Image: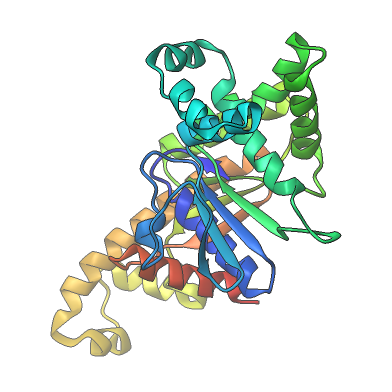
Amino acid sequence: MTGKGGVGKSLVSAALAVRSAQRGDRTLWVEMSESPRGGYLFEDFRPQYDLVPVRDQLWAMNLRLQPAIEEYLSVAFKVPFVTRLIARNTLFQILTGALPGLDSLIPLGKIWYELGRRRGRQPYWDRIVLDAPATGHALAMLRFPQAALDMVKSGNVADRSHEIDQILGDESLTSLIAVSTLEELPVDETAELIESVHQETSYRFAAVVCNSVFPEIGQDEQTRFDAWLEGRDDAAIDGRFGAERDIVRKRLQWLESRRQEQQRWLAQLGSVKVPLARAPWIPMAREADVLHALVEEFARP
């Protein structure tokens, strides 16, 4: 899952991971962030590189580049102390920063490793939900396997890139999902991301989750509701709000104007020809409460 920063990507991915665990699937939720949100979404949870149990059937980790490099080198050199000296050496960090694609290969390689783990003859994980970086970095990650195969024809990098390319391209195994709010910049960035991925790689997005969608309050009586918003008296509605009527009407006018604006951006987002799903606007302050409410929404038939 990816999306422009600030659209609720971590929230939506965490909610999908919780739903997976609730259905009985052994699930791993992976954040890729230097400022992880997991500690706000899950109470009594401290994000870290090592896998941590969050609740029944759900584990989580924060996949950061530096510890991922150290783990990779520990496998290569088989001496943890030497590994730390190499990985934390300033010159080594400069060199790895200059190597194109290393920040994509190492994290993707970690996911590839987790996919390959087994419990007896069964996969260790039933589902892995990856809260990938924001759109720009995510695009670089998705470009990397095929770009690496164009440059390197044999060796460890080529082998890993080929395996990762197969995983990302197998729609029965992997779903690419974008998260967007229905606003100009997120919609434009989401559309550009999907177009770039579809044109430059063999991968395809399975869905776009439109997050924080405002409700249609009028529902089956939208005409009547619109008339009340415009100032027309309505005994039943006026009676419901009493002395607070004008305050409530002003707030609902704002909400309805935002909802209509969202519908226009929703129509534009429909041009990407990728299935659209909706996650509702949830007016709660604590992120853990928002997550709980969103999981309940996802559980509805």
Q: Residue at x 71, y 29 (%)?
A: 198
- Give above or below for 88 relative to 185: above
Q: Is residue 27 left or right of residue 228?
A: right
* Viewer-nearest residue: 210 or 38: 38
> Hey, which residue is sitting farthest left in the picture?
243
Q: Residue at x 60, y 74 (%)?
A: 299
- Give above or below for 217 relative to 235: above
Q: Quadrant of the N terminus?
A: top right
Q: Is residue 243 left or right of residue 299?
A: left
- Give above or below for 193 relative to 238: above
* Visible residue check, residue 158: yes
Q: Position of residue 217 (x, y in %)?
A: 42, 72
* Viewer-nearest residue: 216 or 110: 110
The figure's colour scheme reads: rainbow
Q: Residue at x 42, y 11 (%)?
A: 91
Q: Position of residue 264 (x, y in %)?
A: 49, 46
Q: Quadrant of the C terminus?
A: bottom right
Quarter of the view holding residue 193:
top right
Q: Position of residue 173 (x, y in %)?
A: 79, 48
Quarter of the view holding residue 239:
bottom left
* Viewer-nearest residue: 126 or 293: 126
Q: Position of residue 44 (x, y in %)?
A: 36, 67
> Hey, which residue is sitting farthest right in the picture?
121
- Give above or below for 221 relative to 108: below
Q: How many marks?
A: 0
* Visible residue check, residue 136: no
